[in-house]
Image (cartoon, grey):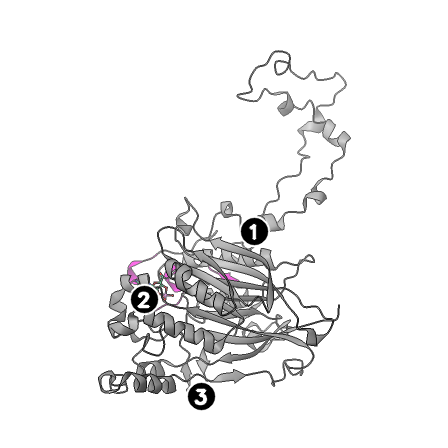
Amino acid sequence: MIASCLCYLLLPAARLFRALSEILWREWEDFSAQPDAQGLEAGDGPQFQFTVMSYNILAQDLMQQSSELYMHCHPDILNWNYRFANLMQEFQHWDPDILCLQEVQEDHYWEQLEPSLRMMGFTCFYKRRTGCKTDGCAVCYKPTRFRLLCASPVEYFRPGLELLNRDNVGLVLLLQPLVPEGLGQVSVAPLCVANTHVLYNPRRGDVKLAQMAILLAEVDKVARLSDGSHCPIILCGDLNSVPDSPLYNFIRDGELQYHGMPAWKVSGQEDFSHQLYQRKLQAPLWPSSLGVTDHCQYFSSCHPKRAERLKYSRDFLLQFRFCDIACQRPVGLVLMEGVTDTKPERPADWAPSVLEEDTLEPEPVFPRTVGTIQHCLHLTSVYTHFLPQHGRPEVTTMPLGLGTTVDYIFFSAESCENGNRTDRRLDQDGTLKLLGRLSLLSEEILWAANGLPNPFCSSDHLCLLASFGMEVTAP
Ligand code: KL2
């Protein structure tokens, strides 16, 4: 590793920067000319095209709290003003239509990032983490390309619930694509964009899964169309979980059998403290009081509509006037002469038997599945987590020189007809079509640049960038 490192001291800053930009060159992979599963080229027919970037920009406060992770870096390149200028250059260079940021420090957001991104033509939303954490998530979009339909900040913290006592957050936007006039009279579905930064702690996979379940429930609610189906979805973020881990497979496959699984296994992060940590996941993973089903939907989203519940006739309800419970004096009822001092007189011809039956509709009950959670959003990853040209895994972050993937752009795809779930990556013929992506790098290439951050890349994560096309239809 040392041998392949650039020798920082021998190169002037400008030449070093140029050398790094060559080493860290990232290819644009263009899929727009490739036929999809139905033999149609992705570029066929009118499309609404847009790009999405997901980027953990390394909050300055968090960096200073874990300064031992950045000992390999020259202090000048860790300076926030240096990093901010570099990050802005990256945003300007790739100029995405939607930008999902994690680890956005609140003061930096309001004083620098939001004003600068506004100057670049973005409208920005921000959700700070709960508690005393100073960073959060931002989602920014170009109002020339999208109109905002709704924005939902998501807090995972739930007072009194040990499973959800962490301060991580998410942010879900519903955006209406604005079709360019050149495409004629066409309509296009809304787009749901979710962004999150899930808990880091490698041992607490139970917390990570519960946080994801809340985000998926929010996405289900925001993206749900009147016919019960979902509009196209993009889910970005730093999930602090690696590819093929149980949490990753849950998002991609829509199902996870978790019962009995050690909590440290969920995220697949490198961690050696688990030998001492034997917490196992048990059913149910979260209590019903969270209001989320094992299918990652809010109970309230599953209730029948109010109008559909009013199905009792007046006569039916009147027969309950004199039932035992109606004749009991409520505890604490204030006694008011002539008003609350009388007891209903049960008529002689009243048949008490009808009232012993349990004829009232019970509150809808959502039976918990035994040790399994599911979701029905049909998500697949933009990246495959492997670089075929190098025969090496893709890397999105480099803690202590160890390359790993924890950042993702997931998007909704049609599920596989043949039921072969591992093939889903190839089956992208949903409303959203992946047109291209910015290639990631290998651990070895990042070593050659002295890891992350470096003078050229100003975060300890790489940015992810993808281009999509969305079907448009005649109105
Ligand atoms: O993995 V991260 O970095 O997505 O890049 O997310 C968390 C970690 C971030 C927010 O909590 O802070 C980093 N060791 C290494 N990194 C840590 C630790 C730790 N103990 N705690 C937090 N982070």
The majority secondary structure of the magenta stretch comes to loop
Specify the quadrant of the image occupied by residue 173: bottom right
Residue pointed to by mark 1: 298
Foreground label between 3 and 2: 3
Q: Amino acid type of disc 2? A: Asp
- The residue identified by callout 3 is 389
Q: Nearer the viewer, residue 184 or 339?
A: 184
| Disc 1 secondary structure class | loop
Quick one: label 3 or label 2, which is nearer the N terminus? 2
Residue 383 in sight in this render:
no
Q: Is residue 273 magenta?
A: yes
Q: Is 4 left or right of 389, judged from the image as shown? A: left
> Would you say residue 304 is visible in this rendering?
yes
Q: Which amino acid does label 1 sit on?
A: Tyr
From the viewer's perspective, is 195 left or right of 12?
right
Q: Quadrant of residue 64?
A: bottom left
Q: Which residue is drawn at 47% across and 70% down?
A: 54
Q: Where is residue 68 in the image (x, y as percent from the top left)?
A: 24, 67
The residue range painted magenta reads 255-278
Q: Earlier in the sequence, mark 1 or mark 3?
A: 1
Q: In this view, does 175 lie to the left or right of 394?
A: right
C-alpha distance separating marks 1 and 3: 43 Å
Q: Is mark 3 within 8 Å of ligand 1?
A: no
Viewer-proximal residue, 447 or 101? 101
Decide: few, some or many residues near mark 1? Use Cα within 10 Å; few <14, some 14-19, many ≥20: many
Q: Is residue 338 above or below residue 390?
A: above
Residue 19 vs 200, above or below: the answer is below
Residue 271 numbered mark, or none: 2
Whole-angstrom CA distance, mark 2 to mark 1, is 33 Å
